[in-house]
Amino acid sequence: MNEISVLNNKIFRAELQLQRERLGDHLCTWYSMATPREKTDDKKICLSKFPYYVGAIIEILSRHHIVPKYWCWWGKLVACDIVFSSKIANDESKVIYVPIPCKRTIRKAKKKGKKVVLLLANSEPRREYERIVGEYDRYGIKNRYIYGDKQYQFSLVKTIPEADNYINITEVSRKTYANAGYDMSKSKLILDTGTNMPKQLADDYQGKQKAFISTAFHSFIKGTHRLLLAWKKAGIKDIPLLLVGKMCEDMQEFIDKNGPFENVVFVGHCANLKDWYKQYDAMGVILSLSEGSGRVTPEMMSFGFPMIVSPDAVCDLIKEGYNGSIVEPTDEDAIAEKLRYYAEDWERVHAMRGNALNSLNRTVNDYAIEIADYLISLSGAEK
């Protein structure tokens, strides 16, 4: 027992709790960030408020435009790495699971002879960096997000090969690492292609508003800028495009420079998507330039929404003409053509609703449990 330790920079909530329960007595210690009010009676969970306060200080600095806003996330990651690296290296565990690229923790654990398992949550970092920076340069964007930070991306390039094992979360994403020459004998495919949203089986869309919906933290990596340009070309007047979620600084700069965008509704943050989606007879649109697995794709499909997606956002789920369409995110003419294709005959959307629902056969819980089981198998212990 006590074979496995986990480091995470997330607040310890439901999905993580499920994974912790599945690890059971195999868990040595779970290290995680905490809010000031957060406490736990679980002796195997080690919480630190320091990363939270680091993020709070950086957020204040970002409001005054002293540092980029994304440094908040990065600062919390680095703080977790500093606070927990020596503790993990010196605990009783044999295997450590690091869902975030904490190089201090990885290197110290390796020196102690521990097996390191790293989650690869996005596609290959050099490819990702080149794609995003190319788009920033093309549109003259100054307010760049973390994926356009060379220091961040190339720290990943150096850190990933040091791990003993990787977890890839879609076959599409896995191929980006294979194509870049990574040692794929280290790779384990554990699909993060599910959703805990219940399937919406209602067939009656009469009276509901037709809409194209794109839900994301809208940024250049999500391809929202290309969607907006394609929307202009499509010239659709009778069906709106609804953008749900906050706008990253890069997207806000793009919108300020290139707007207005006719028949686009910027919905903003939506606290209860489960109820909000039920109002619409919709088709989803996600045109990510780089993705490990976007959970929005299966979430929207659980409401019977077919999807227009980029190859990176298919989440191993979308099949052309069956439950949606796949387009290159930089081909605005192709995107506009697909938007018009569905807008001109909405029965094409209705015909795919059942296929969208039937394409879902996993949950987020399945993903969490399979990661825990994989870690136990690497430790040599029995589940």
Image (cartoon, rainbow, N blue to C red):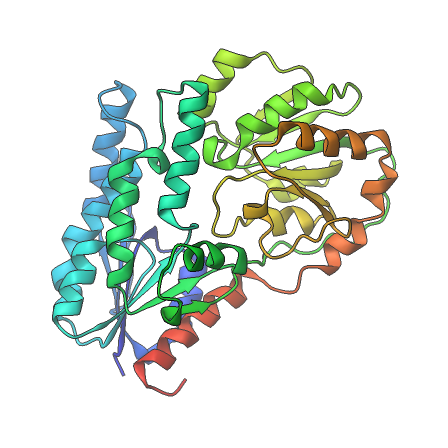
Q: How many marks?
A: 0
Residue 298 shows in the view: yes
Quadrant occupied by the N terminus = bottom left
Q: Is residue 94 left or right of residue 256?
A: left
> Residue 36, percent across and down?
25, 44
Q: Nearer the viewer, residue 24 or 133?
A: 133
Residue at image point 36% right, 31% down: 145
Which quadrant holds residue 131? top left
Q: Is residue 229 left or right of residue 373?
A: right
Q: Nearer the viewer, residue 223 or 202?
A: 223
Residue at image point 27% right, 41% down: 152
Residue at image point 25% right, 79% down: 2
Q: From this viewpoint, which residue is outermost toward the bottom?
A: 382
Q: Is residue 307 left or right of residue 33?
A: right
Quadrant occupied by the C terminus = bottom left
Which quadrant holds residue 108? bottom left
> Residue 342, percent across and down?
80, 35
> Residue 321, percent across and down?
77, 49
Q: Is residue 310 above or below residue 7?
A: above
Residue 266 shows in the view: no
> Residue 244, percent across and down?
58, 32
Q: Is residue 279 above or below residue 378?
A: above
Residue at image point 67% right, 60% down: 360
Q: Is residue 154 above or below residue 380?
A: above
